[in-house]
Image (cartoon, rainbow, N blue to C red):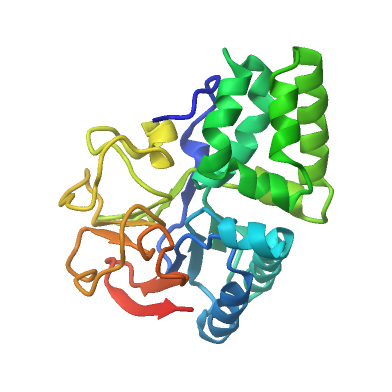
Amino acid sequence: MLPKAVPTSFSHESIAALGNPVRIWAVGSLYGRYGALCQLHEALSRKIQPGEALVYLGNYLGAHSQWTGEGQAVLGELIALRDAVTALPASSPESVVFLRGAFEDLALRLPQLAFQKDPAAWVEENLPKGLEFYLSAYGAEGSDLLAAARADVFTINRFTHDWQKRLASPAGHAGFFAQMKAAANTQTRQPLAFIPHGLDPRVSLHLQRELLCWPQSDISRLSQYGTYGRVIRGTGGRWTTSADKDFVVTLDGGGGLDGMIHAACLDPQGRVLEHLTF
């Protein structure tokens, strides 16, 4: 079920254009695993070369960071590696892309809470869907949010204003959220599509809107999507040994149930050159 919200803008600018990089590194959902992320980044710092692209597929926080209190550390680590990679020769700010997963989508929709038909119902529905992961990372409480949602529009606006200040307070975090993309693709004859979770195969990528985070159908067995040569996503299924043959590649272990972060290196045709887990 899509989280009910006022319409949000969505345009071609929401799709990151990766060009035609020599190789693309894609990182699946992190679920707040700070230690594993640091290990992955240590490996990537040795492997990634100038002229390559790096795409994170969303869902950066999760139950693990809520439990450990390392939510902001996860985001800080992402920002630090982005800065290191974009400083490489032949790299640019567009070389590293962060997609907006379902958890980020909820956090960024929160400032619109006063426009919901039933703010309290929206909060009750979406706290367990991932909103609580971001609230805890920035020192906010779900119970306080729910109380505000049950009060009046002035109380809601005070909470959401404070929420926006919390997101912007740590150095670099405001830019991190502002630069998130809905999806990414390469510019080749058979481009690769990078998405957080799912899509409607009948609809072009720039019109998918919320379906990228909140799909209405399973695309695990999808065999074709427009002119795309392959679809790579950050969650929605499980990495399999047949990933090199599947049209849809899922860099996840079943909603994070395997306790690992999955990443892959792909060539411009979408062939998996290397699969990393930490």
Residue 47 against residue 101 in the figure, above or below: below
Q: Residue, x 57% and y 30% (percent of image)?
A: 124
Whether residue 23 is visible, yes or no, is: no
Q: Nearer the viewer, residue 256 or 239?
A: 256
Q: Residue furthest toward the bottom?
A: 46
Residue 74 against residue 110 in the figure, above or below: below
Q: Residue, x 58% and y 81% (percent of image)?
A: 39
Whether residue 276 is visible, yes or no, is: yes
Q: Residue, x 27% and y 71% (percent of image)?
A: 271
**Can you give x and y, in whole percent of width and height, for residue 204 in the image?**
31, 35
Q: Residue, x 18% and y 49% (percent of image)?
A: 222
Choose top left, top right, bottom left or bottom right for residue 229: bottom left
Q: Nearer the viewer, residue 199 or 162?
A: 162
**Can you give x and y, in whole percent of width and height, for residue 201 in the image?**
23, 39
**Can you give x and y, in whole percent of width and height, for residue 3 in the image?**
48, 29
Q: How many marks?
A: 0
Quarter of the image for the N terminus: give it.
top left
Q: Nearer the viewer, residue 108 or 209?
A: 108
Residue 11 against residue 61 in the figure, above or below: above
Choose top left, top right, bottom left or bottom right for residue 64: bottom right
**Can you give x and y, in whole percent of width and height, for residue 103 in the image?**
55, 45
Choose top left, top right, bottom left or bottom right for residue 120: top right
Left-right relation of 74 to 52: right
